[in-house]
Image (tube, rainbow, N blue to C red):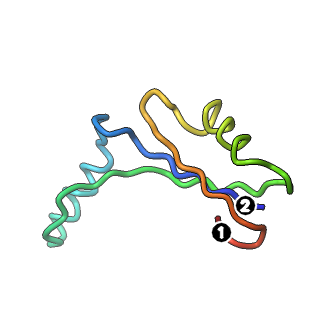
Amino acid sequence: MKARVTVMLKQGVLDPQGAAVQSALGSLGFEGVEGVRQGKVIELDLADGTTEAQVGEMCEKLLANTVIESYRVEMGPAGKSA
């Protein structure tokens, strides 16, 4: 079983990396990029029977800083990305 956790800064939290990427894209001539938010994706290989609630607990305790970040969990079968 696999899980994919997407962690993003919450709306309203400054995202200097996203701003830097947006600026760099503009410098490279890519027009029309009106905003960039940068986050991270964490893929977990899990034992069968691991629940989404358990992955949520992992997020709450370690994988995301829930003060400034939100997260989304996608569960999938082994051998495939969630």
Q: In the shown orientation, is residue 82 left or right of residue 1?
A: left
In primary-sequence order, the first of circles 2 and 1 is 2
Q: Amino acid at mark 2?
A: Lys
Asked which secondary structure carries label 1, the reply is: loop
* Horizontal side of residue 6 vs 46, given as left or right: left
Q: Nearer the viewer, residue 36 or 53?
A: 53
Which label sits on residue 13? none
Mark 2 Cα-neighbour bin, 10 Å: few <14, some 14–19, many ≥20: many
- Image position, residue 27 (x, y; %): 15, 64
Residue drawn at x 76%, y 72% is 79
Answer with left or right where residue 31 lies relative to residue 13: left
Whether the residues at callouts 2 and 1 have beta carbons within 8 Å, the answer is yes
Q: CA distance from mark 2 to mark 1?
A: 7 Å
The quadrant in which residue 3 appears is bottom right
The image shows residue 26 at horizontal and vertical percentages of: 16, 64
Residue drawn at (22%, 65%) of the image: 25
Say which residue appears at 28% left-offset and 55% top-offset: 36
Q: Please give the residue where the numbered disc 2 appears in the rendered image.
A: 2
